[in-house]
Image: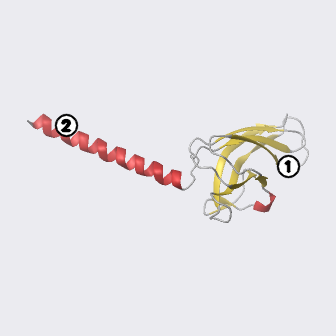
Amino acid sequence: MASGKNNTKIVGIVIVVVAVLLALYFLLASHGAPSGAGLAAIYSTTGNLTVTVSQNTGSGWAVASVLFVPSGTAYSNGVPLVNWNESVPLPNGFPSGKNVVVTLRASGSVALGTPLSGTVWSEWQYNAGGTIYYTEVGTVNTAAT
């Protein structure tokens, strides 16, 4: 009889844990947290950073732009303090589950092998004119080729 009560308690705990995890997942997804966001980067001696980015939130972003944020940049409320007017707009938004190739200005001309580190961020909206969100898309740690 005691083992039946223990099994019921364990099942109850598992149900609560799963419910909390699901609630957290849907909360993050509804706020655009990048589930499975990805990034591949090539840094050239011209100072350009060509990145292939993706976002897999399940919702396309109608308006989006991408920006390189160098290591050491200051942040305020979790968002880098940069000039977002220098970001590269994605003319067709940022669809969920699709790869987008973007060339970003990371520096001036550099020597072969010069290291580059930082993050790539997206400024985006679900609908044009809607709330603006900022999401880190990926981390860059590469050298000029």
Q: Is residue 83 visible?
A: no
Write the residue at 72% across / 53% down.
72
* Label drawn at residue 31: none
Left or right relative to 99: residue 77: left
Residue farthest to the left, as pictured: 1
The three-letter amino acid code for the residue at tag 1 is Ser
Q: In the figure, residue 6 lies in which quadrant?
A: top left
Q: Is residue 87 visible?
A: yes
In depth, the one of 63 and 137 nearer the eye is 63
Mark 2 or 1, closer to the camera = 2
Query: Residue 28: x percent and y percent?
Result: 51, 52
User: Helix, strand or loop at disc 1?
Assistant: loop
The three-letter amino acid code for the residue at tag 2 is Asn
Query: Residue 54: x percent and y percent?
Result: 66, 42
Q: In the figure, residue 63 lies in which quadrant?
A: bottom right
Q: Residues within 10 Å of mark 2 (few under 14, many from 20)?
A: few
Q: Are marks 2 and 1 in contact (CB under 8 Å)?
A: no
In depth, the one of 126 and 48 nearer the eye is 126
* Label drawn at residue 7: 2
Q: In the figure, residue 37 lies in which quadrant?
A: top right
Query: Earlier along the polypeptide chain: callout 2 or callout 1?
Result: 2
Write the residue at 67% across / 57% down.
124
Q: CA distance from mark 2 to mark 1?
A: 61 Å
Query: Residue 119: x percent and y percent?
Result: 70, 48
User: Helix, strand or loop at disc 2?
Assistant: helix
In depth, the one of 52 and 42 nearer the eye is 52
Query: Mark 1 = which residue?
Result: 107
In depth, the one of 129 and 76 nearer the eye is 129
Quarter of the figure with the C terminus: top right
Write the residue at 10% across / 37% down.
2
Q: Residues within 10 Å of mark 1 (few under 14, many from 20)?
A: some
Q: How many marks?
A: 2
